[in-house]
Image: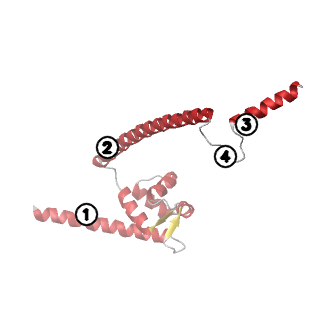
């Protein structure tokens, strides 16, 4: 029995290596410039090729979803795909999604959602506390300015000086 399990694992590993080599060859064929990366435009242009269409069939992906495929393969968000991103991404995309993987993703999304809810609540509480503190500071400044407790910046007349100026102006108008 152990021998059969070892043989199955060896066959699976050989199959994965074979598929990996096929993806490497596909990447090299798509990398027309030889620069080691493929940008989105080159990727989409290559998908009109018959070999590329067969590649998509191998992945069970519709050619009209090339943009989605590119985004999935571009793990680092650089708007280009290098050989490692291409090969490893294709290996992960090959075959049907497993129920275990989908369940794990659902759990991860739920945790993220809960974390975001907690972060939002914390942010709201902080904003409310900050708003209350700012209102308190504003009322203190207002109270101090009416009591004459704040020094005036240079060139700005004090409240008393301003009231004298206005009363002088009223006297001039009244005359």
Instruction: For the residues labelled 4 and 3, say whether their Cβ atoms are less than 8 Å apart.
Output: no
Residue marked by disc 1: 12
- Image height check: is 135 above or below 16? above
Local packing at callout 2 (Cα closer than 10 Å; few below 14, some 14-19, many 20+) is: few
Q: Nearer the viewer, mark 3 or mark 2?
A: 3
The Cα–Cα distance between marks 4 and 3, rounded to whole angstroms, is 13 Å
Taking the image as shown, residue 96 lies to the left or right of residue 25, namely left
Q: Secondary structure at mark 3?
A: helix
Q: Earlier in the sequence, mark 4 or mark 3?
A: 4
Earlier in the chain: of badge 4 and badge 1, it is: 1
Examine the image and state in which quarter residue 122 appears.
top left
Secondary-structure class at tag 2: helix
Provide the residue designation for mark 4: 153
**Which sits in the foreground, 104 or 112?**
112
Cα–Cα gap, marks 3 and 2:
68 Å
Q: How many numbered marks have been drawn onto this rendered protein structure?
A: 4
Query: Under tag 1, what secondary structure?
Result: helix
- The residue wearing badge 3 is 161
Q: Quadrant of the C terminus?
A: top right
Q: Which mark is residue 107?
A: 2
The residues bearing labels 4 and 1 have C-alpha atoms spaced at a distance of 80 Å
């Amino acid at each position: 029995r152990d021998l059969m399990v070892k043989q199955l694992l060896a066959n699976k590993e050989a199959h994965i290596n074979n598929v990996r080599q096929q993806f490497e060859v596909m990447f090299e064929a798509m990398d027309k410039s030889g620069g080691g990366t493929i940008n989105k435009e080159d990727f989409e242009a290559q998908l009109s090729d018959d070999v590329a269409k067969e590649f998509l069939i191998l992945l069970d992906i519709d050619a009209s979803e090339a943009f989605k495929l590119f985004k999935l393969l571009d793990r680092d968000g650089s708007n280009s795909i290098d050989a490692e991103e291409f090969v490893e991404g294709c290996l992960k995309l090959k075959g049907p999604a497993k129920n275990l993987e989908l369940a794990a993703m659902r759990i991860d999304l739920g945790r993220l959602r809960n974390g975001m809810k907690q972060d939002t609540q914390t942010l709201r509480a902080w904003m409310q506390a900050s708003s209350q503190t700012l209102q308190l500071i504003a009322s203190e400044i207002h109270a101090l300015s009416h009591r004459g407790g704040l020094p005036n910046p240079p060139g700005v007349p004090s409240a008393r000086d301003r009231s004298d100026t206005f009363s002088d102006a009223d006297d001039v108008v009244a005359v």
